Amino acid sequence: MAPILYDYCKMPMDDNLKEDGDKCCKLVVGILGLLVIVILGVLLTFFIIKANSEACQDGLRAVMECRNVTYLLQEELTEAQRGFRDAEAQAVTCNQTVMALMASLDAEKAQGRKKVEELEGEITTLNHKLQDASAEVERLRRENHVLSVRIADTDSASSQDSSCAAETPLLILLLGLGALLL
């Protein structure tokens, strides 16, 4: 096998040479350290060159654009969710209002039906009263006619009491008005 630099240094065993051997080891360690630093520097330079390349810059721009678009989309989503919650709350309010209005409408309908029934009852009562009054008027007309015929007969027979003839139509008129007021 070939000797390797970092294995060991061959040195004589005397003290003078021992000091030279320490110097040699330090030199090897220094060279190895410098070599590691140079390799890391080359690798870092290569990485920096690659990081600053156009493809990498395009990738960074694409990432930033995606972040911006994602942020904007997130904002739009938040706004849409807020609008949806507002619309839902408004829909609930509208549904409650509709239900209240429907209940009120049903109550108004029931009250209207009750009023119509009352008015129909009043109309029926008034129709009966009208029929009764018409029958009474018809009866009074017949009586008036009969009385007029009697008066005409008695007028021709005697004209003795003209004040009685004037009181009879007045009596018939008062009876007719009394019947209508009932």
Image (cartoon, grey):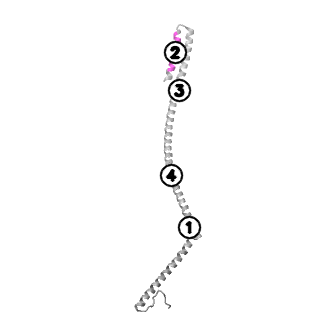
Q: Which residue is mark 2?
A: 170
Is residue 50 within the magenta segment? no
Label 2 or label 4, whichever lies nearer to me, is: 4
Residue 12 occupies which quadrant of the picture? bottom left
Q: Amino acid at mark 1?
A: Leu
Dot 1 and dot 4 residues touching (CB under 8 Å): no
The residue that mark 3 highlights is 130
User: CB under 8 Å between callouts 3 and 1?
Assistant: no
Identity of the residue drawn at 41% across and 90% down? 16
User: Of label 1 and label 2, which has the lower sequence position?
Assistant: 1
- Whichever of labels 2 and 4 marks the residue nearer the N terminus, that label is 4
Q: Which residue is mark 1?
A: 60
Residue 74: horizontal and vertical position, in percent? Answer: 52, 59
Label 2 Cα crowd, 10 Å radius (few <14 / some 14-19 / many 20+): few
The main secondary structure of the magenta stretch is: helix
Q: Which residue is mark 4?
A: 86
Where residue 171 appears, as percent x and y from the top left, is 51, 16
User: Where in the figure is residue 98, as x and y percent of width and height?
Assistant: 51, 46
**Of the pair 147 and 119, the residue shown nearer to us:** 119
Mark 3: amino acid: Leu
Residue extending furthest toward the left? 15
